Amino acid sequence: MADLPLNTGFSGVPPVSADLLSVLPSSADIFDQLADALAAEGYAVMPDALPPALAADLLLRVTRFDDDQFRSAGVGRQGDYLLNPFVRSDEIHWLSDADGAERQYLDWMEQLRGALNQRLFLGLFDYEAHFARYQPGAFYKKHLDAFKGRSNRVLSTVFYLNPGWLEADGGQLLIYGDSDEVVDRVNPLMGTLVVFLSDKVPHEVLAARRNRFSIAGWFRVNNSLNQHLDPPR
Ligand code: OGA
Ligand code: MN
């Protein structure tokens, strides 16, 4: 017994105080707040929505892609996919389960999907997402992500990956209201998540003055009829 080391309470992990734990919002709180804002306004803007370590991993991932791992983003649905550099000039890379950080992001969105279905009965069926890179000068003109009855995209998400973004860096997301007025102007700051109704909220990305990284994604409903699979596999 005498040889047992003294228990100093040291385990290599610094203790987390109860105070700190109580101010870190749980994901259930975050899902509640997102659902409430969506129901009230049709959109939600939430700083520090995802775990900071995951945001850091995603930023590392997107900044390590070579140019040939991006492709120019198109406009329209799969069928009438069009490259139009006058509408948008970002470049994209689709997320998949094959990478650990991407998988964690998709898992978090899967949690959000379940939470929003429970709270708002949206019947969201699946989720797709891509990284986007806006190089200096790149923009995305005012648009809707979906047109009623012509798309199965119901809810859009944008998650930003830009530490220390300043107003002067441009690249703000403008959110428009019913009478075409700007109702919100969002800096694409690391950790901020925006969620909005895809067919109801016009929005625009102002030209960025430095590299601007984000993950855009869409929750979709299942419109499959008979043998016609939509979304396509
Ligand atoms: C989009 C989009 C907004 C943003 O990809 O459809 O509107 O802030 N992105 O990156
Ligand atoms: Mn959009």
Image (tube, rainbow, N blue to C red):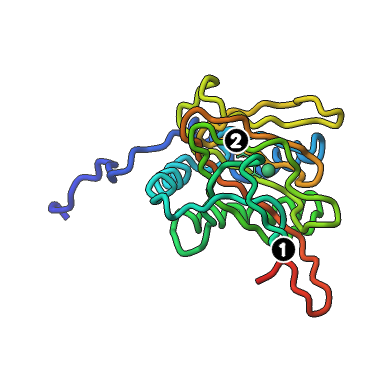
- State the residue at coordinates (77%, 44%): 197
Quarter of the image where ligand 2 sits: top right
Camera-side residue: 72 or 14?
72
Query: In the rendered structure, are the residues bearing label 2 and label 1 in contact, judged by CB atoms less than 8 Å apart?
Result: no
Q: Residue tagged by mark 1?
A: 79
Nearer-N-terminus badge (2/1): 1
Q: Amino acid at mark 1?
A: Gly
- Against 169, residue 74 (above or below) is below
- Residue 115 in the image: state x and y as whole percent: 70, 52
- State the residue at coordinates (72%, 59%): 80
Secondary structure, mark 1, is loop
Q: Amino acid at mark 2?
A: Phe
- Against 123, residue 17 (above or below) is above
Secondary structure, mark 2, is loop
Q: Residue tagged by mark 2?
A: 139
The part of the image, by quadrant, that contains residue 219 is: bottom right
Q: Decide if residue 217 is on the left or right side of residue 55.
A: right
- State the residue at coordinates (60%, 45%): 27
